[in-house]
Image: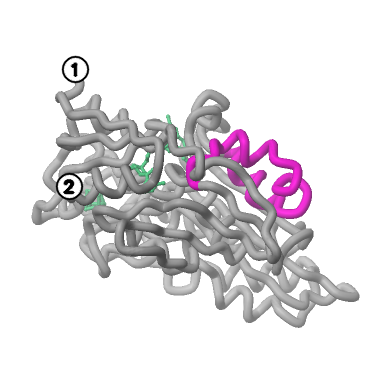
Amino acid sequence: MMPAFQLFQPDDLESAFSLLDKFGDRAWILAGGQDSFDWFKDRGKRPEAVIDIGSIAALKGVRETADGLEIGALTTLNDVINNDIVATSYSLLADAASRVASPQIRNVGTLGGNICQDARCWYYRAGMDCYRAGGNTCYADTPEGMNREHCLFGANRCVAVSPSDTAPALVALEATMVVKNSGGERIIPAEEFFIGPEVDIERMTVLRPGDILTAVRIPNTWANAEFYFEKVADRNTWDFPLVNVAAAIRVDNQVVSDIRIACGGVECVPRRLSVVEDIVRGGGKDDESARIAGGAASRNATPLNYNHFKIPLMENLVRRAVRDA
Ligand SMILES: Cc1cc2nc3c(=O)[nH]c(=O)nc-3n(C[C@H](O)[C@H](O)[C@H](O)COP(=O)(O)OP(=O)(O)OC[C@H]3O[C@@H](n4cnc5c(N)ncnc54)[C@H](O)[C@@H]3O)c2cc1C
Ligand code: SF4
């Protein structure tokens, strides 16, 4: 049985902010609930107040803007996938969203929830008192710890990874996040929205109590570029990425004029591969450049006991992204 909480269902943002201000860190924002209900049912999180934002119409839908797209945070993953403009001009995001979980979860799960979801480390999810849960050890980073799914980069006490399939696509598309609270609005580049354990070990994003991610903006900078998304997981559906890659590439006269590429599942944040971008930009999309780019992707990787396989996996995904986009 879930621990009891007070449920609020505001239908406008102002009411949601006043509830969030009232309950502070004892409040929990509920969107599609696909991540949240796991926590509640496992008794891993026990909020005093659940603020269900599902009735706030302003947070739903895909809108064209003067310089791109704005996607309400409450838009379901299926509505993102099936939107004509996303599917034609920003298909990288549609491809990434269509690889999330299962059809049922994509019907209910929202883009905002997919971006804001918490770490999927087994120990943390099982309610163990690790660093991320406020304790003083990491159970995954021990000689016999189950760390097959964990990070290659950016370990800092915690070795969990960013589990989202849409996050690297949004980094590659140069998206920005619209975050609001009762005091105003901030616009944050996707790359800065996600934070690692060195910044705050108990959060995966810059969001603080009182904040709501209201929308994701995608500039038209990469509209209709060459795109590549690939995810490798243990199962083809209903499973998180071991590693995924998202790339947006502009090619003029067979020369790569620009590229943005990011991987998920390798660091606590979606990892933008600036080194790869620098190698590829100005060159061809042939197999040799792609091989060199793939090799550079894993530079400085520090594997744990059971995740060495992620190094060649990441290298091959990047190689294919550069060659086949
Ligand atoms: C079995 C299973 C398999 C899965 N497989 C994958 C997968 O392969 N790839 C993948 O990427 N994900 C996967 N997921 C995760 C799933 O996609 C996400 O949990 C889901 O998209 C979350 O969306 P939601 O709207 O249901 O979020 P919720 O559960 O409602 O919220 C998730 C978190 O985000 C916060 N939040 C939500 N919206 C906002 C907002 N607008 N502003 C501020 N905070 C907010 C909530 O407080 C909560 O902490 C899987 C989940 C399950 C249960
Ligand atoms: S990897 Fe992070 S979440 Fe997992 S046990 Fe270690 S500190 Fe906790």
- Label 1 CA crowd tier, 10 Å (few <14, some 14–19, many 20+): few
Q: CA distance from mark 1 to mark 2?
A: 26 Å
Which residue is the extreme one toward the top? 1
The dominant secondary structure in magenta is helix
Which residue corresponds to mark 2? 22
Q: Residue at x 21, y 42 (%)?
A: 27
Q: Quadrant of residue 129?
A: top left
Q: Quadrant of residue 259?
A: bottom right
- Asked if labels 2 and 1 touch by Cβ distance under 8 angstroms, the answer is no
Position of residue 250 in the picture relative to residue 138 (left or right) = right
Q: Residue type at mark 1: give it.
A: Met
Q: Residue at x 58, y 49 (%)?
A: 71
Q: Quadrant of the N terminus?
A: top left
Answer whether residue 79 is magenta in the image: yes
Q: Residue type at mark 2: give it.
A: Lys
The stretch in magenta equals: 73-99
